[in-house]
Amino acid sequence: MWQHVRAWFFRNALNKAVPRQPFRQMMHWHEVQHVGVLIDIDSPSLVHAAHQAVAAMKKMGKQVRVLEWSRQKDFPQLGTISSWRLSAKDVNWYGKPSRGVIDDFTHSPFDVLLVFVEKIELPIRWVIAMSRASCRVGIDEAATDCFDLIVQVPAEAQNTSSFFDTVKKLMSLKGEPLTA
């Protein structure tokens, strides 16, 4: 029963808080300048893939900002690439993150938000919904309401490093006819 009450409070708060945004759109990868990256640091394969993607984007001259998410109350001591961190202690009882923790990240006008999270939970759903990104890309196929583009990562592929390469390839096809 409490799950339904929690979900109702979350949906109600989110519907009131989501800003009215201009039309979201896909951009060609070469037009992308500002990239937001959301990482689930409790998943080592996602952390590795995200670190590779961030390094590659910085090498391409993209401005990258990273928010790390952990389900633990105390943040794991890992090699971090982020100045923003969101953990379980920063989330209220129904899943809404504290305002100060994510405001800078969600108010940044990213061209693309890449979400390296396999299963979208309420705090992550909040961050994605509040983001001012023009395009939101993720790998959770069940979260169709969160993303503009969902990249399927095969279950047998334990390494999700192909996620970034696939996103880059798909966004480079914008405006080109797709042929079989």
Image (cartoon, grey):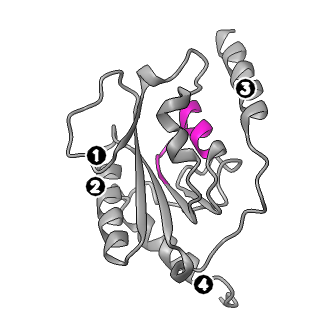
Q: Earlier in the sequence, mark 4 or mark 2?
A: 2
Disc 1 packing (10 Å; few <14; some 14–19; many ≥20): few
Start and end of the magenta stretch? 115-128
Q: Which residue is mark 3?
A: 13
Structural distance between the alpha carbons of marks 4 and 2 = 26 Å
Q: Is residue 5 above or below residue 109?
A: above
Q: Which residue is mark 2?
A: 48
Disc 3 packing (10 Å; few <14; some 14–19; many ≥20): some
Q: Which residue is mark 1?
A: 44
Q: Residue furthest top?
A: 1
Disc 1 and disc 2 in contact, CB within 8 angstroms: yes
Whether the magenta-drawn stretch holds residue 27 is answered as no
SS at circle 1: helix
Structural distance between the alpha carbons of marks 3 and 1 = 32 Å
Q: Which residue is mark 4?
A: 173
Q: Is residue 89 left or right of residue 139?
A: left
